[in-house]
Structures are given as C-alpha cells and as structure tokens.
Amino acid sequence: MRKQKGFSLIELLIVVAIILIIAAIAIPNLLRAKIAANESAAASGIRTINTGEISYANTFPTFGYSATLVVLGTGGLVTPCPAPPTNAASCVIDSVLANGIKQGYTYTYGNTVGAPVVAYQIRNVATQPNQSGVRSFCSFEDAVVRFQASGAIAACTGTVTVLGQ
C-alpha cells in the first residue's frame, strides 16, 4: 500500500484548538489596549482644548474664552480655515475634535454667559462605556486635566481626581 501525504482530521482539529486558545488569550488584551489608547487620546483631547482656549483668549481678548467648541476649530466639520482666522473660526484645534466626538469619546463644552467669557468647562465621556473607554476626563480654565474612574463626570470641580496623581 502506498503512503498517503497530508494531515489527519485529528491533527487539524488539534491545530484549530490551539489557535482558538491563543485567540481567547489575545483578544481581551487587544481590547484593553484599545481602551487604553482611547483614554490616552481623550486626555490628550482635553489638553488640546485647554491649549486652544488659552490661545483663543490671547488672540481675541475682547471675547475671552470661546463661546462654543466649534469656534475653536474651523467653524464646521468640512469648512476650511479662513485666512486670517476669525473669532468664529479660530483654527486652534482640529475640526473633528471641535465637532465634539473623537476616538470613542463625546466632548461637552460649557462656559459662562457674557462678554468676555471668563470661564469654561470641558468634559468627555466614552461613547460606548466599557468598550471605547472606562474613565471620563474634564478640565476648566485652570487647565488641569481631571478624571473619574467610571461613568460621566457631572461637574468638573477641584474634587475630581487630577490626572497623573
């Protein structure tokens, strides 16, 4: 009888089982890495908005801080930057971040009413809790980034945990 070449069904099933075991170990680590990357981007987004607010207030001192998050960008998602920038489209942050949703986080902006605007508050929360992120971040005019371990931050105050401590 001649010798057959190839793999038996048992050998193939063992290989498939090994691959499934490796995948079961790797997928949760991949998801945790994605959450960590989204949270890092969310904290960075808060820092970017803080820097944008300072730049805006220095460029347009009669307005103070920006009236909305959109005016820190181009004034719209697909609107190009005007030359020179205006108080309605200052181009100090990218238009995606100015639109309020970026990398699995939704940003909420609030400020004091009046002219000039003397106070602002920026908060973000994961758009899909426990999937796109776990922590929420916030800041106000002191430019210190704070976080809450889980859930949305109701109000950004000095009692929320400071990032990096």
Image: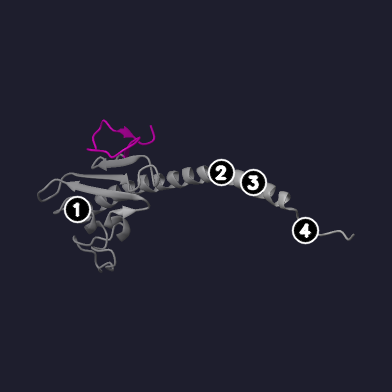
Q: Residues within 10 Å of mark 2 (few under 14, many from 20)?
A: few
**Foreground residue among 132 and 17:** 17
Could you tell me which residue is drawn at 31 percent across and 44 percent down? 125
Residue 19 place in picture, x, y as percent: 63, 48
Could you tell me which residue is drawn at 53 percent across and 46 percent down? 27
Residue bounds of the magenta highlight: 145-165
- Which residue is the site of mark 2? 24
- Residue type at numbered disc 3: Ala
* Closer mark to the observer between disc 3 and disc 1: 3
The reply to whether dot 2 and dot 1 touch (C-beta < 8 Å) is: no
SS type, badge 4:
loop
**In screen coordinates, is 156 left or right of 24?**
left
Residue 165 place in picture, x, y as percent: 38, 31
CA–CA distance between discs 3 and 2? 11 Å
Could you tell me which residue is drawn at 25 percent across and 40 percent down? 142
SS type, badge 1:
loop
**In screen coordinates, is 13 left or right of 120?**
right
CA–CA distance between discs 1 and 4? 69 Å
